[in-house]
Image (cartoon, rainbow, N blue to C red):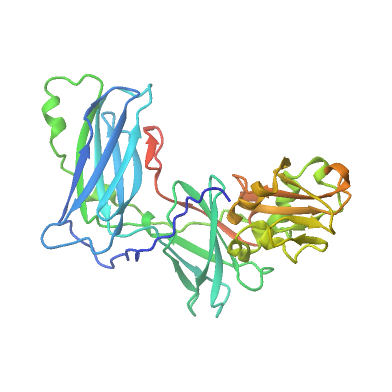
């Protein structure tokens, strides 16, 4: 797996309030500049300042940003708030329309959360959830299911859209009937609101004084009708992720037909090993790992490949286990190994592995947070 973007959260996540809250705090919005030109970048920092004795009781929340131009066109961003602050960089394209832009912010006192219900099973106890991002990074966890089928997921932080898939933890041959809703996409009453303006181009003299003043913002702007998220994909193939990966990414002489496929990506216990040699010990007949870490196959040499390129044993030993998708072991004589030795081919995870989701999962497309550095596109309503 690539460098992981799904960061486990160590703080408790914010719970959604059952009752409407009137904004009593304020948002202090800071722009590094308020007069820009196309091609510039705008750094935005938003701090929550409590009022009336009301505090942000947890360290995590969510900031909704609405950017509107003079023609009334809007785009939305969503940034995580950690310890009362959200920040990011907005890049302006060379083709940006000149004129005044209004940036409006609303704070909701909750973090990413998925609420769901299993409709066709009782007393499951738990289900397996897997999150796959657009870049191919992924993580999975066991989720507790209440006797009435309800469950909640509150501990994933990711950018952009992602796929969230579910399966049974024991019997993977039977599909689940699940409905989910993302709490960040539901109606909420902002804890605080605020606004600022900036100008792209040369602002008229009458406009300049207002660029340094806060903008009055209404709470109704951030209201959104919460909707249930339908399942978009149901995979019924019996192939494992490793088998699919092997078919899609292994080529040429590495399809010898006499190899042993070791399914690292299908074995959650694999990440507990220091390196792939420790993992392979005892799993491949004829392969021995010396106390020094040097492998041999029935006393003969072993040649190593990383994504079908020959490398040293040390390079293979240094690959983090979460980065490995599959390993293929070729007994001697392997045509790719000089002198008729054995071969070990390690394949790393790739981006865009949506088709490698485990069989029989129910899959949903969900919205995460806007990247902290993003190009401003007024033609795209992101959320």
Seen from the viewer's position, the closer of residues 220 and 278 is 278
The percent coordinates of residue 376 (x first, y second) are 36, 33
Quarter holding the C terminus is top left
Q: Is residue 211 left or right of residue 19?
A: left
Q: Residue at x 49, y 80 (%)?
A: 147
Seen from the viewer's position, the closer of residues 3 and 72 is 3
Q: In the orientation shown, which residue stands out farthest toward the front?
A: 292
175 is higher (above) or lower (below) than 121:
above
Seen from the viewer's position, the closer of residues 92 and 262 is 262
340 is higher (above) or lower (below) than 364:
above
The percent coordinates of residue 279 (x first, y second) are 67, 62
Q: Residue at x 30, y 41 (%)?
A: 66
How many circles with numbers are drawn on the protein?
0
203 is higher (above) or lower (below) than 124:
above
Q: Is residue 9 left or right of residue 255?
A: left
Q: Residue at x 16, y 39 (%)?
A: 215
Q: Is residue 235 visible?
A: no
Instruction: Answer with the quarter of the image where residue 119 lies.
Output: bottom right
The percent coordinates of residue 202 (x first, y second) are 22, 19
Q: Is residue 272 visible?
A: yes
The percent coordinates of residue 272 (x first, y second) are 58, 64
């Amino acid at each position: 797996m690539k460098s992981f973007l799904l960061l486990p959260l160590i703080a408790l996540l914010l719970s959604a309030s059952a009752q409407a809250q009137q904004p009593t705090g304020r948002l202090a919005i800071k722009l590094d500049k308020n007069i820009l030109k196309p091609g510039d970048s705008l750094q935005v920092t938003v701090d929550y300042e409590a009022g009336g004795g009301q505090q942000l009781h947890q360290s995590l929340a969510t900031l909704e940003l609405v950017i509107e131009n003079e023609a009334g066109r809007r785009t939305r961003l969503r940034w995580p708030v950690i310890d009362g602050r959200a920040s990011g960089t907005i890049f302006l394209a060379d083709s940006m329309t000149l004129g005044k832009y209004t940036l409006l912010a609303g704070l909701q006192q909750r973090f990413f959360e998925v609420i769901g219900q299993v409709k066709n099973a009782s007393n499951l106890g738990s289900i397996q959830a897997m999150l796959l991002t657009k870049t191919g990074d992924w993580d999975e966890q066991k989720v507790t299911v209440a006797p009435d089928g309800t469950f909640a997921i509150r501990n994933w932080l990711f950018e952009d859209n992602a796929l969230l898939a579910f399966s049974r933890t024991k019997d993977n041959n039977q599909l689940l009937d699940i409905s989910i809703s993302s709490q960040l996409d539901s109606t909420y009453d902002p804890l605080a609101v605020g606004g600022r303006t900036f100008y792209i181009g040369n602002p008229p003299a009458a406009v300049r004084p207002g660029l340094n003043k806060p903008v009055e913002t209404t709470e109704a702007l951030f209201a959104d009708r919460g909707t249930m998220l339908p399942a978009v994909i149901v995979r019924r193939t019996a192939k494992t992720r490793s088998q699919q990966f092997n078919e899609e990414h292994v080529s040429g002489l590495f399809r010898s037909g006499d190899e042993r496929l070791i399914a690292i990506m299908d074995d959650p216990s694999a990440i507990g090993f220091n390196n792939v040699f420790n993992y392979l010990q005892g799993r491949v007949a004829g392969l021995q790992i010396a106390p020094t870490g040097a492998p041999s196959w029935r006393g003969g040499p072993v040649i190593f490949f990383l994504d079908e390129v020959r490398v040293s044993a040390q390079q293979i030993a240094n690959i983090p286990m979460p980065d490995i998708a599959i390993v293929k072991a070729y007994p001697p004589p392997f045509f790719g190994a000089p002198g008729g030795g054995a071969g070990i081919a390690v394949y790393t995870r790739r981006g865009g592995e949506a088709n490698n989701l485990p069989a029989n999962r129910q899959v949903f497309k969900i919205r995460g947070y806007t990247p902290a550095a993003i190009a401003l596109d007024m033609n795209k309503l992101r959320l």
